Image (tube, rainbow, N blue to C red):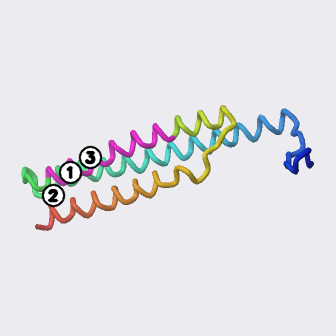
Amino acid sequence: MRKAGGQVSAPAESSETERGSRARDHLANERTFLAWLRTAATVMVLGLGVAKFVEPGSARAEIAGGILLATGAVGIVHGAVRYRRVNRELESGHFETGALARGPIVAGVVLLVAVVVAFVLILI
């Protein structure tokens, strides 16, 4: 539908369709949050394994494990902050698409650097 001034508006949806769409959006946000938690927990377990089983008592292994533990903890915090932000956006109906795409890229780079540093510490 065209409004005065050339603006385009979508046809009105039924409230039932809108509720279903909203529920799907919230469930998708929750699944994404759980993926962040799963990934962060895996990194933390890797850190514990490195600290415990790679040269037990070695300062390098403990530092490498600590780096991975800290990276996992940061991942949990980032996932929680992202979940709450998206949840607020879903509730308000105002979405910032693409503006915050930097977060997952930075998180991936941080994770990659942490894993490389930890394994370099182990191998030296």
Going by the image, does 112 lie left or right of 37?
Answer: left
Callout 1: 10 Å neighbours few (<14), some, many (20+)? Answer: many
Which is nearer the N-term, disc 2 or disc 1? 2
- Furthest-front residue in view? 5
What is the x, y in percent for residue 75? 38, 46
Q: Which residue is mark 3?
A: 69
x, y percent for residue 51: 17, 51
- Determine whether the residue tagged by mark 2 lies in a helix, strand or loop: loop
Instruction: Find residue 87 and name its label.
Output: none
Q: Are marks 2 and 1 in contact (CB under 8 Å)?
A: yes
Question: Residue 118 location, x and y as percent?
Answer: 21, 59
Task: Tell me which numbered mark, 3 or 2, is placed earlier along the sequence.
Answer: 2
Q: Residue 45's x, y, as percent?
A: 30, 48
Q: Nearer the viewer, residue 89 or 72?
A: 89
Amino acid marked by disc 1: Gly
Q: Residue at x 54, y 37 (%)?
A: 85
Residue 54: give its label: 2
**Secondary structure state at the residue bearing disc 1:** helix
Residue labelled with disc 1: 65
Task: Determine the residue positioned at 84% across, 33% down.
Answer: 15
> Residue at the location (30% across, 48% down)?
71
Q: Are marks 3 and 1 in contact (CB under 8 Å)?
A: yes
Q: Quadrant of residue 106?
A: bottom left
Residue at 85% x, 49% y: name it: 8
State the predominant SS element of the stretch in magenta.
Answer: helix
Quadrant in which residue 95 is drawn: top right
Q: How many marks?
A: 3
Please name the amino acid that badge 2 sits on. Val
Dot 3 falls on a residue whose secondary structure is helix
Q: CA distance from mark 3 to mark 1?
A: 6 Å
Magenta part of the chain: 62-82
Q: Disc 3 to disc 2, how far (Cα)?
A: 15 Å
